[in-house]
Amino acid sequence: MINRIMLLALGILRRTLQNKPRFFALLGAPVFQPLLTWIGQVEAWEVYLKASRDCPAYQRFLSDQHAPAIRRAKDLSLLPATTKENYVNKYSLEDRCYGGRIPSKGVVIDESSGSSGTPNNWVRGPAERNSVKAIIQLSYALRFEQGDFLILNCFALGPWATGMNVSMSLVDVGIMKSIGPDKAKLENAIKLFGPRYRYLINGYPPFIKNFVDTTSLDLSQYELHLVVGGEGMSEGLRGYFGKWFKSVFSSYGASDLEINIGAETQFTVALRQLCWKNATTSQILFSREDPPMIFQYNPLDYIIERSPEGELVFTIARLANIAPKIRYNLHDRGGVWRHADLKQKLSELGIDADSMAKDMASFPILYVSGRNDLSVPFFGCKVFPTDLDHIIHQDARLAKHLNSFQIQNVEDAQFNRLLYLHLEQGEGSTETLGDLHDVFYDGLARVNQDFREITKMITPQHVRVTLYPYGTGPFASRDIRVKSRYVS
């Protein structure tokens, strides 16, 4: 009975926070962080108890995995992690819902983009959609103190999770026009409404880059703001976007879980730019010279752990969701910092965190280095899409005249391992870029410390760079509705 009363009280508190941005901002104070974390852990524990009792798939999963019996919230980390392979693909959509059935009303079924394989479907009920809507609106209110935007949503629409959720969530806070990833429609919308509006454009980074590179509009006439998602973004690309956009923020999420789990803030952007300029600081904080994406998240809603393999494990701490997500591993690499611990480490490095951003909240830090299944192994190192993104956007000419790329590990007829870098020229670009081999070979050695080490055992001829006209070769037949594929 006491637990029921406590959970009811926590539910009321959550709804209050989600609808009161100013109140939520106050909870960013350091003194509240242990309480918020404790509340999240209690609710995650209740989700586990309910799932182990009422969710057929999770019941069988615990049995199949010989999971230990746990009796305390702090022991959740002892449970086996669920993944797409051992849970989503193994049990039916219905069995992954409470009661083994999809409710007959109020349900939306989203589809993942399929960027890492076959698309999957995800069931979301009205309570979950309302929670996601509140989180997105809250993030919007905290990022943009002065609203009144014409919001142009260029994420993929239809069954894909991100685009539809963005449109449904932000329609109440601005003028919404849902466009999808269509450059002509985006250009026409801006031309139609003109410079008297402030614009907030939402979309995938490659789509936005292609738009600014090819549009006939003089974008300097407009006040543009940008929110991107779906994949990582280098600081070089943020700087490139800064030529046209007054602000550039990224969000982190996944159709497997929820969109907007983490959001960039002024503090995380400043921290990432600091690490981008100082590889030593990045190495100390994140164990890599090239900084990861860095976000802050709400510990009331999400319990985020780091596995021994360095992968992120998520639990959504909400009982109202139709299908529980307990210790779900996306195979994204990264980790978390308590804000107080990060601030202390920065202080040890002689950096005053309080001076990095105004109105800094003390919510925990989530950092993401990319997906394990989107890296290419090569001579014992891993080459990531963010490595090539970094090289391209440190060179103004490449940034303007390259549209996309793919990385491929190939074994030739003599069983030699070769790294193929396929580059796509920008749409309409006739620029002669010349031989780009050294640019990318030397660039990989600069931005990827493991690649730098293997240059002692390979020759430059092990890396092959090919430039293709726009929309040809491996870039033909792309589907603009889904995220770009960077690994062949």
Image: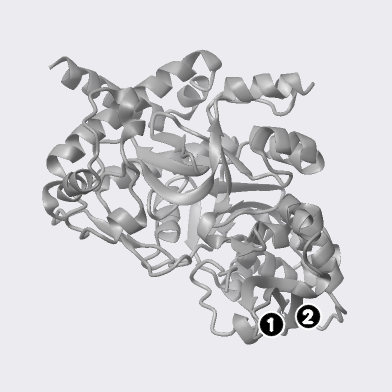
Q: Label 1, label 2: how many angstroms apart (C-alpha)? A: 8 Å
Please give left or right for residue 356 compared with residue 380 in the image: right
Q: Quadrant of residue 465?
A: bottom right
Q: Which quadrant, please, contains the N terminus? A: top left
Q: Position of residue 327 (x, y in %)?
A: 35, 41
Q: Which quadrant, please, contains the C terminus? A: bottom right
Element carrying mark 1: loop
Look at mark 1 in the image and give the residue it sits on: 470
Is residue 140 in view from this perspective? no
Q: Position of residue 474 (x, y in %)?
A: 61, 82
Q: Quadrant of residue 210?
A: bottom right
Which residue is nearer to you in this view: 419 or 321?
Answer: 419
Please give left or right for residue 232 compared with residue 259 in the image: right
Report the amino acid beneath label 1. Tyr
Pointer 1 or 2: first along the chain: 2
Residue at image point 72% right, 38% down = 283
Q: Position of residue 232 (x, y in %)?
A: 61, 54
Which residue is nearer to you in this view: 455 or 193?
Answer: 455
Which residue is nearer to you in this view: 69 or 469?
Answer: 69
Q: Position of residue 140 (x, y in %)?
A: 52, 41
Look at mark 2 in the image and give the residue it sits on: 429
Give yes or no for contact between labels 1 and 2 (Cβ–Cβ under 8 Å).
yes
**Mark 2 surroundings within 10 Å by alpha-carbon count, few (fewer than 14), some (14 through 19), many (20 or more):** some
